[in-house]
Amino acid sequence: MARVKLDLPDCFSFSTELDVRVSDINYGNHVGNDRMVSLLHEARLRFMREHDFGEFNIAGLGIMVTDVVVSFMAESFVGEHLTIRVGLHDFNKYGCDVAYQVENHAEDKIVAKAKTGIVFFDYDERKIARIPKIFLERCAPEQLDLLEQVSEAE
């Protein structure tokens, strides 16, 4: 069976710590795939808060997840302390990928690698929107030239 190939950036700009709770465990006695997606969501929310954003409050826009990829490298069990590293990459004029690396330092292992594609969304108008400049200024200043390139191309 072919496996998904997930290329993550070399640099992550944010990390957060989360403990595996009993509610994160499935019938296999390890973190379930659905619960891993919830842990990633929590990490993304903390990343946004670190930059004074909420998922529905980025210059009047929200974000919408367009795709999710999770590649498990190891099991994770109740009581373990995980570090989730977060970084942004693969930008376009409407969004980017949020990359994650989930680590268990006590066991010296990478538990999972993942990414969520996000687009900016105007929930009032029900349509996708361009990346707000303030998002790039706070979260990915090295990408500010993206706005100029898009403006020049149009």
Image: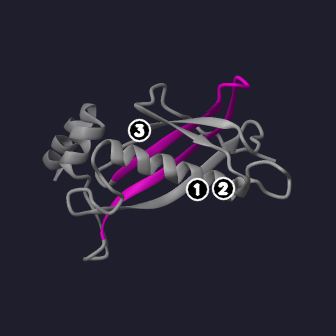
Query: Pointer 1: what residue?
Result: 38
Q: Earlier in the sequence, mark 3 or mark 1?
A: 1
Q: Are marks 3 and 2 in contact (CB under 8 Å)?
A: no
The image shows residue 118 at horizontal and vertical percentages of 42, 55
In which image quadrant can residue 108 be found? top right
Query: Pointer 3: what residue?
Result: 89
Please, what is the three-letter code of the amino acid marked with disc 2? Arg
Query: Pointer 2: what residue?
Result: 35
Residue drawn 33% across and 56% down?
Answer: 54
Per the image, is 129 magenta?
no
Vertical position of residue 150 compared to residue 74: above or below: below
Please, what is the three-letter code of the amino acid marked with disc 3? His
Q: Which residues are magenta?
A: 95-122
Residue drawn 55% across and 49% down?
Answer: 40
Closer to the camera, 129 or 72? 72
Which type of secondary structure does the marked residue at label 3 adopt?
strand
Q: Earlier in the sequence, mark 3 or mark 2?
A: 2
